[in-house]
Image (cartoon, coloured by chain):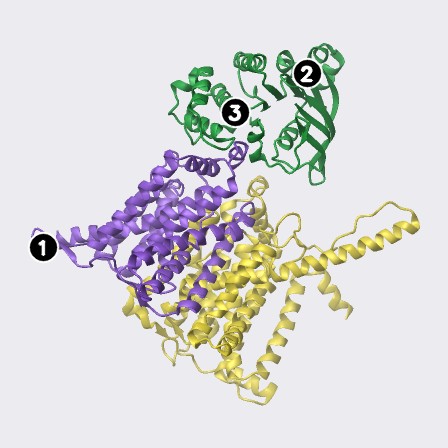
Chain colours: A purple, B green, C yellow
Amino acid sequence: MQQLVNTALGGLTLGAVYAAFALALVLIFRSTRIVNFAQAPMAMVTTFIALTLIDAGYSYWIGFAAALLSGLVLGAVIERVIIRPVEDKPEINAVILTLGLFITLHALAAVIFGNRFRSFPAPFGLRGLEVGGTTIRLTTSGIFTIAAVATVMVLLLLLFRYTDVGLRMRASAYNPEVARLLGVRVGRMLTLGWALAAVVGSLSGLLIASGGLVHPGYMDSIVVYGFVAAVLGGLESPVGAVVGGLTLGLSLSFVSGYLGSELVALAALLILMLVLTLKPGGLFAVASARRV
Amino acid sequence: MLTLDKLTAGYGPVTALQDVTFSAGKGQITAVLGANGAGKTTLLRTVSGLHRPESGTISLDGQPLRKVNAEQMPALGMVHVPEGRGVITELTIEENLRLGGLAKGGKLRSEDLERVYELFPVLADRRASLAHTLSGGERQMLVIGRALMSEPRLLLLDEPSLGLAPRIVAQIFDLLRGLVDDQGLSVLLVEQNARSALSVADHGVVLNLGRVVADEKASVLAADDQLRHAYLGF
Amino acid sequence: MNRFLDVWRHSVLGRHLLTALIGLAVVVVVLESVGDFRALQLAAMAYLGIAAGGLTVLTGINGQISLGHGALMAFGAYTTALLLDDPTSSMPISLVVLASTAVALLVGTAVGVAAARLHGPYLAGATLALAIAVPGIALYFGSFLGGEQGLRVSLPDVPVWALDLEYLLTGTEMSRSQYVAYLGWITLIVTFVLLANLARGRVGRRWRAVRDDEVSAELAGIQLGRARISAFMVSAAAAGAAGSVLAITARLAAPSGFTIVLSLTLLTAVVLGGLGYLSGALIGAGLLTFLPPFVTRIGGDAGLSDIRAAELAPLVYGLVMVLVILLAPAGLVGTTRMSLAGRRARRQMAAAGAAGATTGSPGTTAPHDSSDEHDPGTPQASGSTTPKGSTR
C-alpha cells in the first residue's frame, strides 16, 4: 500500500514536469504546426545559465528568474531568426531544422559549460514528508514542482482567456489570415508564442534539474516524454497537455516501480503508438478522424 | 473613396488581373461581378493587402496605399470581410467580435459590442457559444458584425451570398443597404450572384479574365441583355 | 570503349554495376595505401554511409523521416555480436551480416507498419521514442545482452582465400583492420547497388509518387501504406547491415553506442549530402568521419580542453544542418547539380538563341537532360528550383 502511494506521488511530481514540457510543445505546435524538438536543449541551456549564476554565489531564485528570462529571449530569437523562414515550407524542413538546432545547442552547451554531470541545487528540502507517522515520497520540492506548474497553467489560462493579447494569439494560431485582416500582427504573436513556450520549457528544465544532476543531454529523454504527453492530450490543447503529462507521469512511475526503470522509455513508446493508432486526436478527441 | 488605377496582379506566370481601373464611390455599394476565375477574389485580396500587385496603384480617399500591409488596413478604415469561412470557429461569438473591435488598435469599446448585438440579436443570444455552432447565415452575420466593430468607412465583402438561402441573402443585402443609406458606409461587394448583387448595388463593374469589361450604373448593367447573357449568366 | 558508353547510356543496371566496379577499384587502391588507423576510420565511414544510404532512400525519396535508425542499427549490431560471441565460430562473416540485415528488416517491418500512418512531426516523435526506448531493452535483458557493458564481438580470423588473394595482388599480409574495412566497403557497394536499382525502378517511382502527392499517387493505383512500409523495410535492412559492420569494426555492441546522438548523426549525414542522393549520403558519411578529428584539433589549438574540443564537431554539423535547410535545402550534391543544370540550361538557351537569331526561328526552349532522369528526392526543395538528377 505504501509503495503504491509513493509510486503515485512520485508519478504525480514527474507528471507535472512532463505536463510543463508538453505545454511548451503544444503552445508552439498549435500556432506554427511545428513540434519543437529543440525545446529540450533550449531548456537545458537556460538551466545551465541558472547554474552558472548560482555557482557564482547568487541565490537560487536569481538563477531561477534568469533562466526563465533567458528562455523568453531565446525562444523569441529562435522563432524570429531561424524558424520564420521555414514556416510556409514543407513540414519536414521544420522538423530537420529543429533537430539541427537540437544538435547545435547541445554541442554549444558542452563547449561552454563542459560535458560532465554537475549537481543542481534544490530550492526546498528533498526529504519525504511525514504523514501520520510514516514518511511518504512527497517532498517539499515535489510540492513546489506541482505548485509551480499549476501556477503557470492558471497564468496561461488567464492570459489566453481574458486578455486582448491572448485573444490575438489564439486568433493567429487558429486562422492567421483572418487574424491579419483583423489587424493582428501575426508574426509578432508567433514570436511571443515561442517566447512563452520557451519560458514554460525552461521551467520544466529547472524543475527536473532541482536536486539532481545536469548535463548537456539531461533533457533529451524529456522531449520524448513531453511529446508523448502532448500527443495524449491531442497536441493542440493546453489543458490536454497537462492531463496527458500527469497521466504519463503516473503510468511511467508505475512501470518504473513495478517492472523496471529500463522499460520506462519502451513503455512511453508503446503508449504513444497505442494513442496514435486508437485515438489519433488524443484521449479527449471527440472525432478520431485526423491526420497524424 | 477607393480608386484602382491600372492594377495588375498574378501568381507567377499567371496573370489574374490586367490593368484594372475603376472607382468605388463614397456612400455607395459597388458590385464587382464576373464568373469564377474572372479575378474577383484576387482583386479583393490585392486591395486588402494580402496579395502584392505587380503594378498599378490603389488609393483610399486619394491617398495611394503603397507598402501598406493587410494588418494596417482596419486602422485606415477599411475592413475586408472574408466569406463565411472567415469566422474563427474555435473562438466564441463574442471573442470573434472582440477581435473585430481590436482591429483598429487600442482598446475594445463596449458600446461597439452593444451596437452590433442590437443589429444582430441572434448573435447576442449566443454570445458565449463557439462560432462553429452557427449556421451559414449566422456566420455571415458574424463576419459582417465583426467588421462593423471597428466602425469602418469601407467594407470589402467577399461573396456574402455563397451557399446561403435566397431569403437570407435578401436579408443580408437589405441590412447592407440600410447601413449605407443611414450611416454613409461604402461597400465594395464581390459577387458571383449578379442578379441579387445588382438589385442592391448602386454601381457595377464586370470582370472577365482579369479585365474590366463594363463599368456602369447597376441599373444600366441589369438592363443590358447582351452583357448579362455573356458575362453574368442571368 | 563504345560498348562501354552504350552500356552506360542504355542500361540502368549496367551503369550501376560499372559504377560499383569503379568504386571497388578505388576502394582497393585506397585501402592498400593506408595504415591500420585510417583503415578503421574508413570502416566507420562505410557503416555510416550504409545507414545514411538507407535513410536517404526513406527520407529523401519516400518523404518519411526517421530518428530511429540508430535503434535499427542496434538490432543489427546485437545480432552480429550474438552470432560472433566465440572466436572459433565457423559461421561465414557474410552470413552474419545477412542475418543481422534480416533481423533489422523484421523489426523495421513492424516499425514501418506502425509508422505508415504517421506524418511529419508525429513520425519524427514516434521514431525518436524508438531511439530512446531500444537501449533500455539491452539493459533490461542484461544477462543475455550484456547490460551496460554490452557484448564483445570476437572477429574470426581473416579467411585463407582473402589472405591468399591479398598476397597475390600486393605481396603483403592483410591486417585485421584492412579486412574489416574491406568487409565494410564491399557491404556498402552491394547495398548501394541494390538501393540504386530499387530507387530507379518501379518501386522507386512509387515511393516518389507517394512523397510528392499522396492523392494523385492513390488515384494512380498506388497503395500508400504498402509503398511506405516497403520503403521503411528497405531502409531498415540497410541500417541492420550498417549495425553489423559497426559491431565488427568496434568489436562491441553496447547501448552507449546507439543513443539518440547516432540517429541524429545519420540524419545529419543525409541532410548535408542532400536528401535523396546516395552519393550525398556517402559524402555526408565522409564528412562525419573525417571532420571531427580535424575540427577537434583546431579547437585544441585554440586552447579548449580535449573534451570540449570534441564537441566542436557536432556544433559544426548542427550549424551546417540549420544553414543547409535555410539556404540550400537540396544539400551539397543537390545544390551543385542544380547550379550545373542551370548553367547547362543557360548555355543551351544561349546557343539556341544564337541559332534562332541566324535562322530567324522563334526562341526555342532549352531541351533538358535527355536521359531518363527523374526528379531526385528533395521534398523540401523550395519554390520551383527542383533540381534535375538521379539517385546514384
**Chain designation of label 3:** B
- In the image, farthest residue toward the bottom: C171
- Where C87 falls versus B2 (above or below)? below
Residue C341: image location, x then y, percent: 72, 57
Give the structural element (helix, strand or loop) at label 3: helix
Question: Circle 3 is placed at which residue position?
Answer: B147
Q: Is residue C375 visible?
A: yes
Give the structural element (helix, strand or loop) at label 2: strand
Question: Circle 2 is placed at which residue position?
Answer: B203
Q: Amino acid at mark 1?
A: Thr
Mark in the foreground, 1 or 3: 3
- The circle on residue B137 is none
Q: Are marks 2 and 1 in contact (CB under 8 Å)?
A: no
Residue B77: quarter of image:
top right
Question: Circle 1 is placed at which residue position?
Answer: A134
3D distance between C-alphas at marks 2 and 1: 85 Å
Residue C68: image location, x then y, percent: 43, 58
Q: Amino acid at mark 3?
A: Ala
Of residues A177 and A162, the one drawn nearer to the viewer in this rendering: A162
**Chain designation of label 2:** B
Q: Is residue C103 visible?
A: no
**Chain designation of label 1:** A
Give the structural element (helix, strand or loop) at label 1: strand
3D distance between C-alphas at marks 1 and 3: 64 Å
Closer to the N terminus: mark 3 or mark 2? 3
> Mark 1 and mark 3, same subunit?
no
**Quarter of the image where the N terminus of chain C is located:** bottom right
- Where A101 falls versus B106 (above or below)? below
